[in-house]
Amino acid sequence: MQNRFIKNIIFLLFLNLLVKPFWILGVDREVQNLLGDATYGTYLAIFNFSYLFYILLDLGITNFNSRSVAQDPKNLSKHFGGLTEIKLLLGLLYAVVIFVVGYFVGYNEGLKLKLLFWCGLNQILLSFILYLRSNVQGLLLFKQDSILSVFDRVLAILLMSLVLWSGWFPKEKFDILWYLQAQTLAYVCTIVFALIVVLRHVEQLSFSINFRFFKEILRQSLPFALLVLLMSVYSRIEPFLLERLLDDNGVQAGVYSRAYRLFDAGNNISNLFAIMLLPMFAATLKNKLELNNLVKTSFNVIVAMAGIVLVMCVFYRQEIMQMLYRPEEAENEAAYLLRIGLYANVFPLLMGSFFCLSTTYVFGTLLTANGSLKQLNLVSAAGVVINILLNLIVIPRFQSVGAAFTNLGVQAVTAFMQYLIAKRIIKFKLGGRYWLHILLFSASIIVITLLTKHLINNWILGFVIAFAANSLAIFATRLLRLKEIVALVVPKGKKA
């Protein structure tokens, strides 16, 4: 079973690495290039606003259902009809909440209202896909679940490729609603596909809502649902605050989103790492020696991956932004370089946030596996309060740079707090010699990147050489050994 699980995690990672970066860095980037910062910034603010209330669509049902079906496949037939009806009612509740709150914050007419409708509809459809996938996961249909995890994005990429690059649609008339509607169609097709997979395993459908059963789900899942809500707020609220606090038609939210794009791409990969770690931590919590080794190795992998990305994005920030974003029509070179400079100021701060957030996928996941949700919720609640208060102060004065700095500060504080709490509760050991290896690796990749940046004029060649040298530094500084990576992904008894 473990070997099967590991193989399918690798398959899941492969599919997501193949599809999602292209969506973020290809399709989504091209959409913003066509729309400009103002329109795209308004869209992103409303999208993140709709995401803040996403937890109302689930309330822990997906997590509960996956465990329930895994424990007894007969629970699929027993619960599917009732939980489906509950999901539909939650979708209605969610729609009411976002439109009522949206009305009072100013998303009540014109394009903003249309954007809110399509963003809200897509969140409802996505929630239903994840619920259907929880049944597939519970049935241990790992390969089907891996395909479903990217099916909607593949369809959306195909649709948007026709719109963006076929020449059939005039680019000067491109409408942001086309982007959202393409995703809607992709979500609907994915729901049909997922339903076909799930219904093949349902023996008998019974559409009756057991509210006592639903109350028990809420009792068990509410702490986890609250954690997801709080983390969503302090990680995603900046574009919404930028659009609301500044009277600039969403321009600064658009600037923020340009730099946020690589953060989002990297976070998609780091989050998949957490999916792999959760069951492994849960299985080793009682074995202190094995747990200690797993914590060290997993944290080293995250530091190696996210650390190299952070350092190279800091030193090559200007070049990366220029590669991603071309000059606009009738924009002279001075104006273009000024605009790129704005993106480059925000970009390294957000990649610092990416590094901090990536470390929480080790210590936060460890606390989740241990059932320490109360402590995680207290840390996340503090993160929300600090984030909102700081942004209210810095955004009016420092705009997108201030928002990015706040995000970095909050992610750093919450990551450090999770580390301290995990160390106190679970009592794993990371001694001084261990941190010396971390410092040595960090200093090495900074020096390597700095030297290649100044010695090699062709930045792409320098970037490739720096990346290769930094990758070798992982093993040269003994941050990781090859056998430790093998031990992380290959079950005992399966090694060559």
Image (spheres, grey):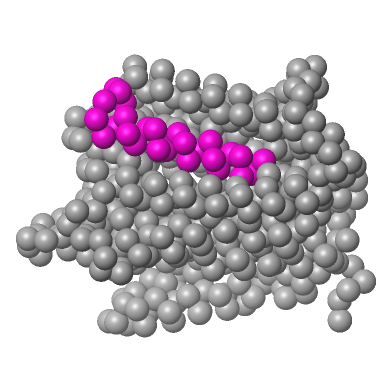
In the depicted structure, whether residue 146 falls above or below residue 132: below
**Residue at horizontal 89 percent and vertical 41 percent from the top:** 74
Image quadrant containing the C terminus: bottom right
In the depicted structure, whether residue 336 falls above or below residue 482: above
**Residue at horizontal 72 percent and vertical 73 percent from the top:** 481
Q: How many marks?
A: 0
In the image, is 410 to the left or to the right of 290? left
Image quadrant containing the N terminus: bottom right
In the image, is 219 to the left or to the right of 299? right
In the depicted structure, whether residue 479 falls above or below residue 180: below
**Residue at horizontal 78 percent and vertical 64 percent from the top:** 6
Label the magenta part by its dominant secondary structure: helix
Image x and y of residue 60, in percent: 69, 31
Image x and y of residue 198, in percent: 74, 48
Q: Quadrant of residue 301?
A: bottom right
**Residue at horizontal 44 percent and vertical 61 percent from the top:** 157
Residue 23 or 229: which is nearer the viewer? 23
Residue 44 or 446: which is nearer the viewer? 44
Q: Quadrant of residue 2?
A: bottom right
Mark yes or no: residue 248 visible. Answer: yes
Image x and y of residue 159, in percent: 41, 60
Mark yes or no: residue 285 visible. Answer: no
Residue 42 included in the magenta stretch of the image:
no
Residue 67 or 156: which is nearer the viewer? 156
Segment colored magenta: 106-131
Residue 434 or 91: which is nearer the viewer? 91
In the image, is 238 to the left or to the right of 377? left
Image x and y of residue 470, in percent: 52, 74
Residue 128 included in the magenta stretch of the image:
yes
